[in-house]
Amino acid sequence: AEEKTKGPFEPKYEDYQKVYKTIAKLLEEKDEYDDGSYGPVLVRLAWHCSGTYDKETGTGGSNGATMRFAPEGDHGANAGLKAARDFLEPVKEAYPWISYSDLWILAGVTAIQEMQGPHIPYRPGRSDRDLSFCTPDGRLPDASKEQKHLRAIFGRMGFNDQEIVALSGAHALGRCHTDRSGFDGPWTFSPTTLTNDYFKLLVEEKWQNKKWNGPKQFEDVTTKTLMMLPTDMALVKDKSFKQYVDKYARDNDAFFKDFSDVVLRLFELGVPFTQGEDARWTFKSSFDEAA
Ligand code: CCH
């Protein structure tokens, strides 16, 4: 009798949930990094893959994982993201069927959920591409600039004012490193938990120019331990941006809902999915499992 040949491995929801769990476990184990978590730098990796998208030419975005290659990996904006890519290398070895580009975005989703953020629905479908797909330098935002620059950069990706503000709430997480961007310090007192504190601090705290040898940044008058970038301060200077800062400062649920919607879109920019939007999955977090 003819033997049925096994087709190629077709990973399903359960397989991706396994990868999620492996990343979540590693996040818990490797707690000696930075403020105690690789979570923030994983979110930054996923955003810097996606944020190169240009809607006019359809180039850039999270398809391809072209940051593996020197031209893009060496862009100034990507300084320090090797820590995130190296963190994920053992996961790629354990699950060789997942593309780097799907893995890096799944890691961003995992990090957000494991830092108590909202669920971010996810679809696989990214494939890795060679270095000829690297994007030119200069597509990611420059922190020394203000509202005009933010609208130009995020407009190129297809985002409006409300979406720019919602996305910026990610700065509740992590910190600036002098040896990476030149800036220094965290935005909030809980840099490994996603909250709307970034917005609350922007409206409730007084901010002053930090006197130091580094690039222009702001410090909170009360403790002088927190920071804001010029691009962060632009969100309260600009009336159209400010209305959304006020809204998210008042209402964490509204922030979580809008953040989930916009991050989902960010993470899908430039990906030629073969499956429709109804094929998106929502992964269980450690908090769902404990419940
Ligand atoms: Fe950001 N970000 N970001 N950012 N960012 C930095 C760190 C993080 C800008 C500049 C910087 C988004 C938008 C912007 C994160 C997520 C997002 C740093 C410090 C700079 C500078 C890097 C360092 O020194 O390590 C600018 C300008 C913009 C314009 O809007 C968006 C959008 C997101 C995600 C949705 C996260 C997370 C970090 C912390 C990384 C870490 O290592 O702790």
Image (cartoon, rainbow, N blue to C red):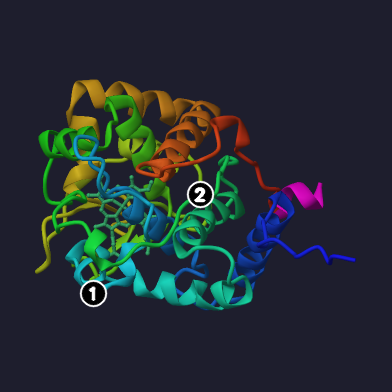
Q: Position of residue 168 (x, y in %)?
A: 34, 41
The percent position of residue 187, horizontal first and vertical second, equals: 35, 52
Tell me: 269 left or right of 158. Answer: right
| Nearest to N terminus: mark 1 or mark 2 | 1
Residue bounds of the magenta highlight: 286-291
Dot 2: element: loop
Question: Tags 1 and 2 in contact by the CB under 8 Å rule?
Answer: no
Foreground pick, 28 / 59: 59
Q: Judge left or right: residue 91 versus residue 246.
A: right
Magenta-colored segment: predominant secondary structure:
helix
Where residue 290 sits in the image (x, y, percent)? 80, 52
Question: Image check: 270 left or right of 132?
Answer: right
What residue sits 44% from the left and 59% below the top?
101
Kindly identify which residue carries mark 2: 125
Q: Please name which of the two marks, 1 or 2, marks the residue nearer to the observer.
A: 2
Q: Quadrant of ligand 1?
A: bottom left
The residue under the point 64% across, 59% down is 20
* Rendered residue at 84%/67% (across/down): 3
Q: Is mark 2 within 8 Å of ligand 1?
A: no
Q: Kindly tell me whether residue 165 is visible in this rendering.
A: yes
For the question of whether residue 201 can be seen, the reply is: no
Q: Residue at x 21, y 56 (%)?
A: 135
The kind of residue on which mark 1 rests is Ala
The residue labelled by disc 1 is 70
